[in-house]
Image: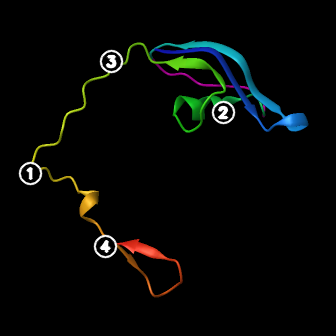
Amino acid sequence: MIEIKNLTKVYGNGAKRIHALQQIDLEIHEGMFGLLGPNGAGKTTTIKMLAGLIEQDSGSISFPAFKRRPRRRPAPNSCRSNTRDRTRRRSTSSPGASMLA
């Protein structure tokens, strides 16, 4: 389940403020769910906030059924790539370009 309480998002400032969401309350239970509404209703803004891509200005989003587990360290001989072993070098093809080796 997902609980959304008093969710608000405002874009812009001053006279150009756009209230994308104004104090939205919503409970989404297990199963399929869709957001329907006209253009500018805040559907995309809501999904982006649920995904953590943008932050809300006020209100809360919670996942009460999701229980956090302690993060486990990978096994010492893990196949996972280690980004710390990569070094950055300059490319001669264009100024300012770089690539990972």
**Residue that mark 1 sits on:** 77
Percent position of residue 50, x then y: 54, 29
Label 2 – label 1 distance at C-alpha:
42 Å
Percent position of residue 90, x then y: 42, 80
Q: Are marks 2 and 1 in contact (CB under 8 Å)?
A: no
Q: How would you rate the neighbour count of disc 4 (Cα within 10 Å): few for under 14, some for 14-19, many for 20 or more?
A: few
State the mark number for residue 45: 2
Inspect the magenta stretch and tell me whether residue 33 lies in it: yes
| Closest to the observer, 29 or 74 | 74
Q: Which mark sits nearer the N-terminus, 1 or 4?
A: 1
State the mark number for residue 101: 4
Q: Main secondary structure of the magenta part?
A: loop
Label 2 – label 3 distance at C-alpha:
25 Å
Q: Which mark sits nearer the N-terminus, 4 or 2?
A: 2
State the mark number for residue 67: 3
Residue drawn at (17%, 42%), measured in percent from left and top?
74
| Closest to the observer, 48 or 73 | 73
Q: Secondary structure at mark 1?
A: loop
Amino acid at the residue labelled 3: Lys
Amino acid at the residue labelled 1: Asn
Comparing marks 2 and 1, which lies closer to the viewer? Answer: 1
Label 1 – label 4 distance at C-alpha:
22 Å
State the mark number for residue 62: none
Q: Secondary structure at mark 2?
A: helix
Inspect the magenta stretch and tell me whether residue 82 lies in it: no
Q: Are marks 2 and 3 in contact (CB under 8 Å)?
A: no
Amino acid at the residue labelled 2: Thr
